[in-house]
Structure formats: structure tokens, C-alpha cells
Image (cartoon, grey):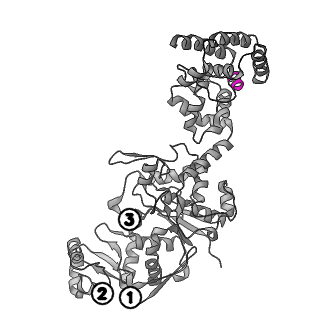
């Protein structure tokens, strides 16, 4: 009988969720939904020394913003909880004891100082079959001494017993069969008595088994731990329910070599976190895609194509389309360069697709931030204004630079445009234009344009000079959408007032 598809995304709350982790979560989600399965969010907080307050909440908020739905988790609940590893201590103790009783793991009492001394004494020291006999552990010490140390509450760790001379086979859905010699593996720590918590290696395997995880989809950086996890499944006798492994390619620097880092984002000016993050210790703020003006749909689309393709040239895809097309057959084995400029292109594309009314709602906080009360303008007015300029932007924040003049009349005029377009004759011509505009019965763009152009031709004026002076007076510079669309929206009174103001201001400045 085929197993239900159950995948898990299992971040540690040690800081903000990196964009590479977001892609891993996304691929888990796409695969689960593609196969009618479940998406589990498990918080792996066994590393108590690296726990960062607020990180768990950040993870949940980021996934929610991106539309990556969770079926089971700390917030959602589920029949296989708790979904936070720090709340599963009793469960892990049982499985640690099971491994020790079966001779698959052992106690080690080496202090941090003793281990450091051994590393200084032995080049490339590794705690394994070649060195464990000379260390302070239950394999090398008399049973009575081990018991006395345990009874006395001496700190210890439990290490997994790796037998040398084996070929460990990892079947990966992207990379195929990967064979690792067990000789290169050390006896990993599975449990630490100091905080009564397992390490990632044990907790990960136990929880995947108990939560019926069918596919483990994670980043390439976890590939070296896969052989150990295969051996742990064997040690527990769980090979029949071992999940399928999928190790995703790395996200690489946009330039040069190596894995994408926060420093790359700082250096090149793009976020590497989904949401803005304020470090609780230093107070330093790191930018996020949401606060930088990216739409969640654009981020999802952009990330999905970093290491995967749909099998054709399609680029713009909704979440539903991504789900319908997603498969690991089209995932790359090699790393994907983080082409952040392509992310801007996706955001531009998605901004063009949303309605002017929805874009206007996104723009209202930008208006407030620039001292303009959106309530002073109708929703229709704001929608029409953004609709005229949205083809020029990649981010909502850029609307202000392109649409400012719709909401605030110019207080200054671009010097180069004044020098080129405002001559000694211009004030008189602009005064005539005021009378032409005031005489219009219909101030719509369609009606006003032929009348004004007819007046220019009739008087033998230079079309470019007159229209650019008109634009300079109303906008403050010789840029923007169609001039008569602008004048229609701001209305006759505002248009005339701005021209009159320009006549007075520019004349005085000369």
C-alpha cells in the first residue's frame, strides 16, 4: 500500500529564516500539495545555546505571508505532537535508552577540555573506531566505573557507535544513489545530559519516524548527515518506513563563487530574509522582502525557479500552477545563482497584473509616510493616479516618485527643463493657455487635447516647447504620463492654478 505523502519543514529558532530555507519550505509545500499530502512545521529547538527569542514567531509569520500553508504544527496542532522538540524530552529518552541497550550507542564522559587537548595532540582528530578506545567512555571503561559516574550525576553525552568498513547507501530523488564509506563518519553525539536534550541527529530521526514523514526534503548542506541518518534508521529497525531523501541544490552568490550569504545581500542591496528582522541582542535591522515592497506571489514564483523548472519556458506561474507542475525530475543537481535582478522583474510583472484599486490600497501607506492623507482623495482618484504610472515601477514605494505630483503641487521646477523649455515668451503663452483651458466645457483628456493642440497650431507656436512648458508647470519636471490624462485627473482648477503659480515662480527666479 502506498504511503500518504507527509513532508516536514523543520527550522531551528536561531534567528531569521534565510531565503534558502524559505525555498526549502516552498518545495516541501509544492510537493505535498501536488500529491495531496500534508505539510508539517516542526520547530527543532534542541540547541538551547543558540535559541533566539522571537525567531519561532518570525518563521510562522514569514510562511503565512508567503502563502505556504501548514497542516500540522505548534500553532495548528495535530495528532503527532508536540511539534516543538524541547517538549518531547520524554520521547527522546526512551529512544536513547533503546540504542544503548541494543549496543548501538554508548556513554562518553570526556570533558570539553579533554577533547580540546586531544584535538591539539592528534591532527584531524575524530571520535571514531580508531580513537574511542583511548577516551573516557562506556566502551573503554569498566562497567562499575561507568555506573558510578552515572550515579554521581557526572555530565555525559551519548554517542552513536559507527562501525567502520561499510558502504552506506543514500537514495536521493535528485542525486540518485550516493555511497559513503562509514570510515569517514565519526561517532556523533546524539544526546547531552547537560540540557537533557537530544542533538539534531537523534531528534530528527525519531520525530520523522513517529510523525510518519514520507519524504525528507532539505538543503544540500544536510547531505553529509544523510548517511548517519540511514544508519540510525537501521539501528532502530525502521528501514521499512525510512523516508525518501531529497537534498536541494544550494543557492549561490549572484557573483563569484560560494553559498549565498547575508553579506551578499548587504553588499549588492537585496534582502536575504522574507521579513524584516531586528536582532534582539544588537538591535540591528536586516531588510526583508515584504518591507522592501515585494509581493508574496512574486517572491514565491522567483524562488520556485531557483533550482527547478516546469519543463518548458513558462516563467510566470501562480501558486496553483506551481503545484500542478512541480516534480523533482526537473530539479537541478547544481547550485542556482541568486539572480536578484530577476526577482525585481517578477515583482514588476506581478504589480502590473494586479488591479489599480488593489495597487491604490498598497500605495496608501506610502502616501501617509510622505505626509499625504489618503482620506483627502477618493479611492477612484488614487486608483487612476497609480494606474497611469505603474508600468514604470518595480516596487510600490517607487510610486511616490512617479505619482507625487498628483497629490502635491510642485514647489520647485527642474533646472534643466526650465533652462531648455521656459523662455522669455513662455509666461505670455502659458497665460493664453490658462484662458483656453478655462473656456473648455469638457475637461476630459479626449475633449481637451484637440482644442489645445488646435490653439497651438493656429498661433504657430512650437508644439514641443508649449507642451513641455505646460508639463513643467503642472508636474515640476518634463516627465510623466500623457499630459491631458494628468490634467483631467487633477481637474481644471488645479491645472490652471499650477500654471499660474509657475508663471509667477519661474519668472521671479530668472
Q: Is residue 305 above or below residue 211?
A: above
Of the two numbered discs 3 and 1 in the rendering, the one whose residue sits closer to the viewer: 1
Tell me if residue 505 is in the magenta stretch. no
Labels 2 and 1 touching (C-beta < 8 A): yes
- Return the x and y of residue 152 as percentages of the image width and height: 20, 75
Question: Which residue has dot 3 on it?
Answer: 46
Q: Residue at x 53, y 57 (%)?
A: 76
Q: Residue at x 40, y 69 (%)?
A: 200
Quarter of the image with the N terminus is bottom right
What is the distance, in whole Å, between disc 3 and disc 1 at their CAs? 28 Å
Task: Report the magenta residues as a range.
Answer: 479-487
What is the distance, in whole Å, between disc 2 and disc 1 at their CAs? 9 Å
- Return the x and y of residue 461 as percentages of the image width and height: 72, 16
Question: Which residue has dot 2 on it?
Answer: 130
- Which element is circle 2 on? loop
Sequence-wise, which precedes: disc 2 or disc 3?
3
Q: Residue furthest bottom?
A: 165
Q: Residues within 10 Å of mark 2 (few under 14, many from 20)?
A: few
289 vs 493, nearest the viewer: 493
Amino acid at each position: 500500500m502506498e504511503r500518504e505523502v507527509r513532508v516536514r519543514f523543520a527550522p531551528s529558532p536561531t534567528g531569521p529564516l534565510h531565503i534558502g530555507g524559505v525555498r526549502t519550505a516552498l518545495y516541501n509545500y509544492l510537493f505535498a500539495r501536488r500529491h495531496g499530502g500534508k505539510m508539517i512545521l516542526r520547530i527543532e529547538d534542541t540547541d538551547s545555546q543558540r535559541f533566539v527569542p522571537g525567531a519561532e514567531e518570525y518563521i510562522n509569520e514569514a510562511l503565512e505571508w508567503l502563502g505556504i500553508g501548514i497542516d500540522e504544527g505548534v500553532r495548528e496542532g495535530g495528532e503527532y505532537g508536540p511539534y516543538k522538540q524541547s517538549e518531547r524530552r520524554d520521547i527522546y529518552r526512551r529512544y536513547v535508552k533503546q540504542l544503548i541497550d541494543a549496543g548501538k550507542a554508548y556513554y562518553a564522559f570526556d570533558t570539553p577540555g579533554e577533547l580540546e587537548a586531544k584535538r591539539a595532540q592528534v591532527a584531524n582528530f575524530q571520535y571514531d573506531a580508531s580513537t574511542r578506545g583511548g577516551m573516557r567512555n562506556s566502551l573503554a571503561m569498566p562497567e562499575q566505573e561507568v555506573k558510578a559516574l552515572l550515579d554521581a550525576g557526572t555530565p555525559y553525552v551519548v554517542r552513536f557507535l559507527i562501525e567502520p568498513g561499510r558502504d552506506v547507501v543514500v537514495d536521493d530523488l535528485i542525486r540518485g544513489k550516493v555511497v559513503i564509506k562509514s570510515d569517514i563518519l565519526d561517532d556523533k553525539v546524539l544526546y547531552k545530559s547537560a540540557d537533557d536534550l537530544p542533538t539534531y541527529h537523534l531528534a530528527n530521526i525519531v520525530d520523522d519516524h513517529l510523525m510518519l514523514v514520507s519524504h525528507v526534503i532539505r538543503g544540500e548542506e544536510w547531505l553529509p548527515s544523510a548517511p548517519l541518518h540511514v544508519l540510525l534508521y537501521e539501528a532502530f529497525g525502521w528501514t521499512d518506513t525510512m523516508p525518501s531523501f531529497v537534498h536541494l541544490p544550494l543557492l549561490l552568490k549572484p557573483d563569484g563563487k560560494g553559498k549565498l550569504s547575508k553579506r551578499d545581500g548587504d553588499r549588492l542591496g537585496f534582502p536575504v530574509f522574507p521579513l524584516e528582522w531586528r536582532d534582539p541582542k544588537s538591535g540591528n535591522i536586516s531588510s526583508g522582502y515584504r518591507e522592501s515592497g515585494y509581493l508574496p506571489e512574486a517572491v514565491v514564483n522567483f524562488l520556485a525557479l531557483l533550482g527547478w523548472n516546469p519543463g518548458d519556458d513558462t516563467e510566470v506561474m501562480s501558486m496553483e500552477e506551481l503545484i500542478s507542475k512541480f516534480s523533482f525530475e526537473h530539479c537541478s543537481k547544481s547550485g542556482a545563482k541568486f539572480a536578484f535582478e530577476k526577482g525585481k522583474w517578477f515583482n514588476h510583472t506581478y504589480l502590473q497584473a494586479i488591479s489599480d484599486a488593489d495597487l491604490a490600497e498598497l500605495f496608501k501607506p506610502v502616501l501617509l509616510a510622505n505626509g499625504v492623507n489618503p482620506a483627502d482623495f477618493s479611492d477612484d482618484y488614487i486608483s487612476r493616479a497609480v494606474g497611469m504610472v505603474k508600468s514604470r515601477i518595480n516596487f510600490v514605494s517607487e510610486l511616490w516618485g512617479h505619482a507625487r505630483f498628483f497629490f502635491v503641487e510642485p514647489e520647485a521646477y527642474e533646472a534643466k527643463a526650465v533652462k531648455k523649455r521656459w523662455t522669455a515668451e513662455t509666461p505670455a503663452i502659458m497665460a493664453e493657455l490658462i484662458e483656453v483651458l478655462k473656456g473648455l466645457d469638457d475637461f476630459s483628456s479626449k475633449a481637451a487635447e484637440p482644442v489645445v493642440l488646435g490653439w497651438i497650431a493656429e498661433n504657430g507656436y512650437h508644439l514641443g516647447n508649449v507642451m513641455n512648458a505646460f508639463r513643467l508647470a503642472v508636474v515640476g519636471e518634463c516627465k510623466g504620463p500623457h499630459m491631458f490624462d494628468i490634467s483631467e485627473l487633477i481637474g481644471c482648477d488645479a491645472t490652471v492654478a499650477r500654471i499660474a503659480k509657475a508663471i509667477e515662480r519661474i519668472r521671479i527666479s530668472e
